[in-house]
Amino acid sequence: MSVLSRIIPATVAAALLAGCTAGGSPDGDGDGPITLRYAFFAPAESFPSLQMERWKEEMEERTDGAVEIELFTGGTLLGSGDIYDGVSAGTVDIGLDSPAYDSSRFPVSSAIQVPIGITDATTASAVFLELLTELEPAEFDGYEIITAFTTEPSYIQSRSPVTTMADMRGLELRSSSATIPVLERLGASPIGMPMPDVAEALQTGIVSGYVSSREVLQDFGLAEHVTHVTDYPFGPSNSFVAVMDQERYDSLPDDVKDAIADLKTEMMEWAAEYHDGENIGSALEFAESQGVETVEVDAAERAQWDSVLDEVAADWVSRNDSADLDAQAVLDRMRELAAEHQQDEQ
């Protein structure tokens, strides 16, 4: 999806909003149900969108129909990077976006992508939500966090095999802002762009691959455009946080707020377990059917890459430490939480 295609003229947005609110009561004080509009940038088939569908079903059931959820996936109302501002502006009531696309705006959230040995979404998601709940970072001031979760670690997925730092040298790879330092230290040339734009970038040769979790092989059809996956996990590829404007949330009836609160951890767990299991499994089967090959990194090369990841963690602290943020304390707490949750899973 191009950048221009995500820009919706004000007249069209107004028409959409008029249709969304018709027949609904925004605060539960009218005759109709409360209607909440929920937006996300990726296709309806992607696992975060499936989480939205699950949340919709649970909310409507738990409130006995007093709340109706309208979903806008695939960037039909707001594109990636616009969603949180759209929530603040009232364009939608709830927005799901990826803080990883703008790590400078979301420094605490970016910590979850620091490579510290987390190997699955189940651990990473539990750590991420607990970290946000415990620290209440300023980057989400003005919002109520509805839920938060992550993907599995990221892997290089490319149009040619990449198994050495020599293969990486100068290779143009799409990356989120949080993984750019990793790729730069490994010698690649990272290019930042939203995931919906990657297929076109691969087709036109703007990039030779990308770094992401592997569900995108199927969710975005990228197995049709790459030939190899490098079996070396970096930090969790992406993070997702669903938010509601704080004033909008506070205006809801208490029983509705209770239902939202009850689902916060439940939806994190559902999304992570689905992603680690069915989502990744299905994506790898699809990739294999498209002829995508997984290639290994040998032990000597892996040791060099491991050393680079250690440097990246230290760099993250240096870049983010400030009078307003004790970055080392954030990283230390994240390591503690990861150890606790990994122990619980054993």
Image (tube, rainbow, N blue to C red):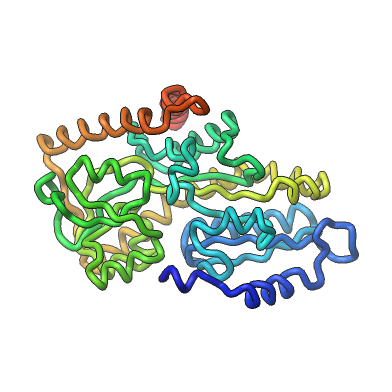
Residue at coordinates 71% horizontally, 60% vertically from top-left? 36
- Residue at the far front: name it: 323
Q: Quadrant of residue 299?
A: top left
Residue 57 visible somewhere in the drawing: no
Against 87, residue 178 (above or below) is above
Q: Nearer the viewer, residue 62 or 298?
A: 298
Question: Which x, y percent locates residue 328?
Answer: 41, 23
Residue at coordinates 26% horizontally, 29% vertically from top-left? 310
Against 158, residue 127 (above or below) is above
Locate the C terminus by quadrant.
top left
Question: Which x, y percent locates residue 268?
Answer: 55, 44
Left or right, residue 343 beside residue 84: left
Residue at coordinates 49% horizontally, 59% vertically from top-left? 80
Number of labels in the image equals 0
Left or right, residue 234 beside residue 272: left
Q: Nearer the viewer, residue 99 or 38?
A: 99
Residue 291 visible somewhere in the drawing: yes
Q: Quadrant of residue 18?
A: bottom right
Question: Which x, y percent locates residue 201?
Answer: 29, 67
Q: Nearer the viewer, residue 324 or 36?
A: 324
Q: Quadrant of residue 23?
A: bottom right
Question: Which x, y percent locates residue 161?
Answer: 14, 56
Locate the N terminus by quadrant.
bottom left
Q: Nearer the viewer, residue 61 or 217?
A: 217
